[in-house]
Amino acid sequence: IGCETACLVLQLQTVTLIPGDGIGPEISSAVMKIFEAAKAPIQWEERNVTAIKGPGGRWMIPPDAKESMDKSKIGLKGPLKTPIAAGHPSMNLLLRKTFDLYANVRPCVSIEGYKTPYTDVNLVTIRENTEGEYSGIEHVIVDGVVQSIKLITENASRRIAEYAFEYARNNQRASVTAVHKANIMRMSDGLFLRKCREVAENFKDIKFTEMYLDTVCLNMVQDPTQFDVLVMPNLYGDILSDLCAGLIGGLGVTPSGNIGANGVAIFESVHGTAPDIAGLDLANPTALLLSAVMMLRHMGLHGYGKKIETACFDTIRDKKVLTKDLGGNSKCSEFTAEICRRVQDLD
Amino acid sequence: MTARSICSLSRALKAVWSDRLALSAAARVHGAASCNQRHKSTYTSIPPPARYGGRHTVTLIPGDGIGPELANHVRELFRFCCVPVDFEVANVDSSLASEDDINNAIMAIRRNGVALKGNIETNHNLPPSYKSRNNLLRTTLDLYANVMHCQSLPGVRTRHKNIDILIIRENTEGEYSSLEHENVPGVVECLKIITRPKSLRIADYAFRTARERGRRRVTAVHKANIMKLADGLFLECCKEVASGYPEIAFDSMIVDNTTMQLVSRPQQFDVMVMPNLYGNVVSNVCAGLVGGPGLVPGANYGEDYALFETGTRNTGKSIANRNIANPTAMLLASCLLLDHLKLHAYASMIRRAIISTVTEARLHTADLGGQGSTSEVVQSIMKAIQSTGPMTLSI
């Protein structure tokens, strides 16, 4: 740790910060305060990503946001609201398409001090984010018959499998499990499974298993400790990652990261914008904070990441200063101040 | 047969007949709609199959893994209780690519109208044109409704208590349409089909069942924010049907939120209706919440046929032939079968004995955290039945 801080002590790294809507701005400023207290070498560049109509009538994110991301390669994003009937697709979809964010990574670790019926959960769900059931290709064939197309391609499957195994190797995880339904969807999930098997050949140090989606669900709610890294196509990933988030306490405490091509990575909180408590200093910044910690680890700043994470978990475990959704009645600023204090104490 | 057992047998038959007459009288007086005792199978319009010589014939498909041993236990138990059911065994070999086995089984089910089955393994070494046999059975016989009742059982230790969820899953279309093609090498399309008639049918089934069983709320599970047309159509059909059942509350929930709610607060759900794949996920999550795959039975109903099996449809290859499988799910499925055949007295008797055995922790099998064996559990059930009255053969 000492060597690391010596090497990077004067090397500020830029991160594009997208505060988002609703409670987004307040939790983003909370995270910035905590990073300042930890003296992390991060320089924030705030950008807004309201969709604008570009040349040719296609919706796109503002060019300065794109430019900032392309330069810094790392982003931290708060919750974005999707206005209904605004004419443009959801912002999350737009970001995903712009930066080709193909992997959604959600580490789910039980938080000491935030009690749920499940203890000792420690798994990671890696979900293919670009194709599968969410290709958006649907049509009405005749009146009353609708067809939705699930697309599985060799390249996307190989790419996500490679990412999963690399993640496992870089984070000292012992096994990777491919989740599928190849007994029913023989060709599509069969292709996904074949690619996973092929990639597993190159990573002999990691144990590879395959399990049906229903078996995973069944075993997950009985004994989540048997799972390590899970890799799967889009829809199963959506369901399973939310299932695992529910095991550790919900979206308010779950970090999430999206990895894209060309080294781009955007880390985000996956909860909603909570418009009813926006601006009232009641929000819980834990999800965004843990996503920021994930970001630090991705950037190689493990020391700072551990420090901030420890401070956050200690605060929650102590139960003296907690926001309303965690069972306490402190304000967001008080919670943030407590974490800052602990971070400084840890130095 | 001794005179004593003949007397007891005739007493038993009289009990059964008087039960039937009382039931039909009750039905005439109160009307079928208000007959909401949960174990009566009035939720299908299928008439009871014909009884030749007073006995029903039921097709039995043992399947793979733990299927054959559980099927034997069912037969053993039925023989012990003198249940008037004969099994016609139709074996399906999962290692062969030919369709003869499964066609014979389907023909047998068409003939008998009712079946009990274990899960048939899908061999991945065969080419993709080989369809899952289980799926083939469901689609060919048009068993459109899969019904799974997940209830917390006393004596089974789980993280959540007081769960009582009825899951109704569309069984024939959706993501399981098995329509796939490879456009160019490396690009595969899989079609998910949602049709209006089938969605209306399953929604109507769900609301009718909810009404018959005195349930208050039906929740439709979907992903219409992403699959706007497909799940949008499903949701629309559910809303349409809901308007015809004003006494039952209707709401909807997105599938990922549903799984999150299920692991934090499953008590909020009553009846759930959903397309095929989400049904697969939700029913497995609920089965896990109430104690695992060894406890929950499943039923598949169609217009003309009914098929009973374990709820989570596992082959249990790793525990096959070791006498450690939990027979509860299969035996409860056989009780659902008896209810369907209107043999309610036998069904209640066997079900009572099974529940009393499950509450005894000493007899829990490995999946419930105990060390009991399958045969011990079945023996205990038979003892419990014998103690209730003289309707049985001696052990």
Image (spheres, rainbow, N blue to C red):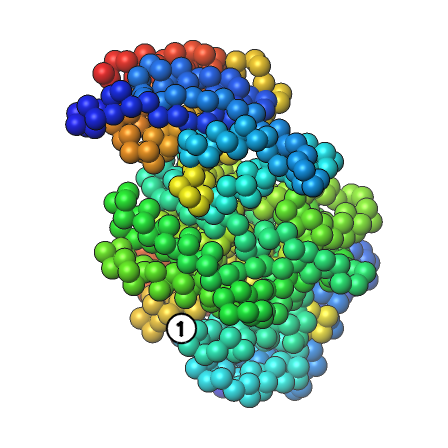
The residue lying at 81 percent from left, 58 percent from top is B31
Q: Is residue B304 left or right of residue A229?
A: right
Q: Is residue A24 above or below residue B250?
A: above
Q: Is residue A240 left or right of residue B322?
A: right
Q: Residue furthest front?
A: A55
Q: Nearer the viewer, residue B231 or B217?
A: B231
Q: Is residue B174 above or below residue B249?
A: below
Q: Which residue lies under the disc numbered 1? A: B65
Q: Is residue B305 above or below residue B364?
A: below
Q: Nearer the viewer, residue A311 or A268?
A: A268
Quarter-of-image position of residue B277: bottom right
Q: Give SS at disc 1.
A: loop
Q: Residue furthest left?
A: A3
Q: Nearer the viewer, residue A46 or B282?
A: A46
Q: Position of residue B20 (x, y in %)?
A: 70, 68
Q: Amino acid at mark 1?
A: Gly
Does residue A100 appear in the picture of this structure? yes
How packed mark 1 is, by other alpha carbons closer than 10 Å (few <14, some 14-19, many 20 or more), is many
Chain containing mark 1: B
The residue lying at 59 percent from left, 85 percent from top is B103
Which corner quadrant holds the C terminus of chain B? Answer: bottom left
The residue lying at 53 percent from left, 65 percent from top is B187
